[in-house]
Image (cartoon, helix red, strand yellow):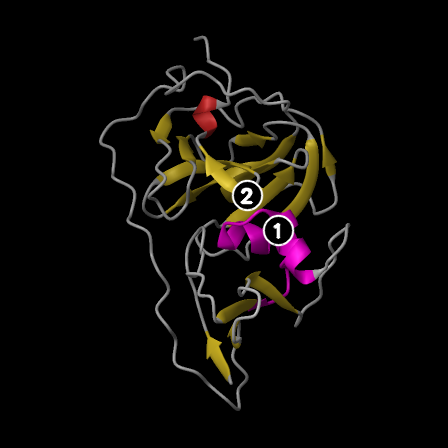
Amino acid sequence: MLALLMLAGCGELRPPAKKNYAVYHTVRPGDTLYSIAWRYGYDYREVAGWNRINPPYRIYVGQRVLVVPTSRGARVEERSIGTAPAARPAAPAAAPVPAPAKKTTQSVPLEKPSARPHQSPVRWQWPTSGNLKRGFNNAASKKGIAIAGRPGQPVYAAAGGDVVYSGSGLVGYGNLVIIKHDDVFLSAYGHNRRLLVKEGTKVKPGQMIAEMGETAKDGALLHFEIRQEGKPVDPVRYLPKQNR
């Protein structure tokens, strides 16, 4: 039995795992293995392993990528996440939506991180200048921080690495860049006005990768995330203390 499930969400989207369901994502133009893993909140290596996709992790439009595996020996009822065929339209199913981030009423200076930086082999730096408009909230739909600025303001790579996604296919992020720094750490830069790097580009620490954009709700800002082995972490705990 094939039940088509259409899910549209913002930020991380992780369907609940059920032992008798295997959930697939149908690859669309612009998708990469990294962006798919990012969308569902998994480490890209997990997703690659489930699908027997080897480096450099090439995928193709129309390919069905397993994003929630079934338990061994369980009965499998497939659910496909993506665009339903025109001949067999399916009613949209509600996706679980995390609680929204609590609104802040005052900007917090960047020089006041919430905790000491974590030990990390990656040498991090701030991706742009400005005030922290929103801090990290693990209950938010997009688990990162928002740095206020002005439209067109430079956005820099927070560390060196490879651009593994550059586009606007992840709903809720606008024009987005994802950089792979090593096998453990990825960073993302969302709501840009213009992207200056393409997938496959190697970037140096502090290299300009985009121009800051703005949202109708919050004005000009950069949404910035760091993920460690696929899990969102508080970027402020990794970034250096700012001296102003």
The answer to whether the residue labelled 1 contacts the one labelled 2, judged by CB atoms less than 8 Å apart, is yes
Q: Quadrant of the C terminus?
A: top left
Dot 2 falls on a residue whose secondary structure is loop
Residue 154 locus on image (x, y percent): 55, 30
Q: Where is residue 120 shown, x and y percent of the image? A: 59, 23
Which residue, given by chain and number where applicable, does mark 1 sit on?
46
Q: Amino acid at mark 2?
A: Gly
Q: Seen from this angle, which residue lies furthest left?
A: 105
Residue to which mark 2 is pinned:
230
Q: Earlier in the sequence, mark 1 or mark 2?
A: 1
Q: Is residue 32 in sight in this rendering? A: no
Amino acid under disc 1: Glu
**Magenta segment range?**
25-51
- Say left or right for 48 vs 56: left
- Give above or below for 180 relative to 205: below
Residue depicted at 43% across the width and 30% down the height = 234
Question: Can you name the residue that lies furthest to the top here?
Answer: 243
The location of residue 115, given as percent across then percent down, is 40, 18
The answer to which of 92 and 154 lies nearer the viewer is 92
Measure the alpha-carbon separation of dots 1 and 2: 9 Å
